[in-house]
Image: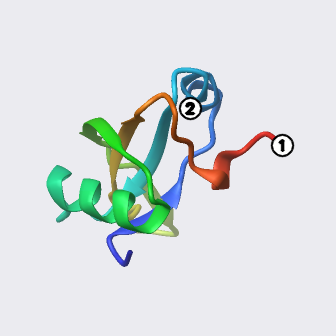
Amino acid sequence: MDRIEYPVLTEKTIRLLEKNQYSFDVNVKSNKTEIKKWIELFFNVKVIGINSHRLPKKEKKMGTITGYTTQYKRMIITLKSSYSIPLFSSK
């Protein structure tokens, strides 16, 4: 689970929960098959599909020095309809 950074909770991802889709920010070096394996083993669910995209860099300034925020890859994971991840449970 060292490649999965954290779950994402935004307005859009909350709407995706109704479609049984969950969003996670993961390490840039991770690939879809690796994340699918980890999600299925850790949460004991069945993954139907995974979509991914890289988030744009954001510039940060501290005085005269300019840098960038840490870059992650966002994975949107679709689960089989009978499964859910308890971390996002509304109960």
User: Secondary structure under badge 2?
Assistant: helix
Density class for disc 1 (Cα within 10 Å; few <14, some 14-19, many ≥20) is few
Q: Quadrant of the C terminus?
A: top right
Across and down, in percent, residue 63 comes to 52, 69
Residue at left 62%, top 42%?
A: 9
* Residue type at the position of mark 2: Thr
Q: Which of the pair 64/41 is nearer the observer?
A: 41
Most extreme residue toward the bottom is: 2
Visible in this render: residue 31? no
Disc 1 versus disc 2: distance between alpha carbons?
17 Å
Residue at left 57%, top 25%?
A: 12
The answer to whether residue 89 is above or below residue 2 is: above
Which of the two discs, 1 and 2, labels the residue nearer the N terminus?
A: 2
User: Secondary structure under badge 1?
Assistant: loop
Across and down, in percent, residue 43 comes to 48, 61
Query: Label 2 near label 1: C-beta < 8 Å?
Result: no
Q: Which of the pair 37/59 is nearer the observer?
A: 37
Model colouring = rainbow
* Residue type at the position of mark 1: Lys
Circle 1 residue:
91
Q: Quadrant of residue 14?
A: top right
Q: Quadrant of the N terminus?
A: bottom left
Circle 2 residue:
13
Q: Quadrant of residue 53?
A: top left
Residue at left 38%, top 39%?
A: 77
Is residue 54 rendered to the left or right of residue 25? left
Residue at left 54%, top 54%?
A: 7
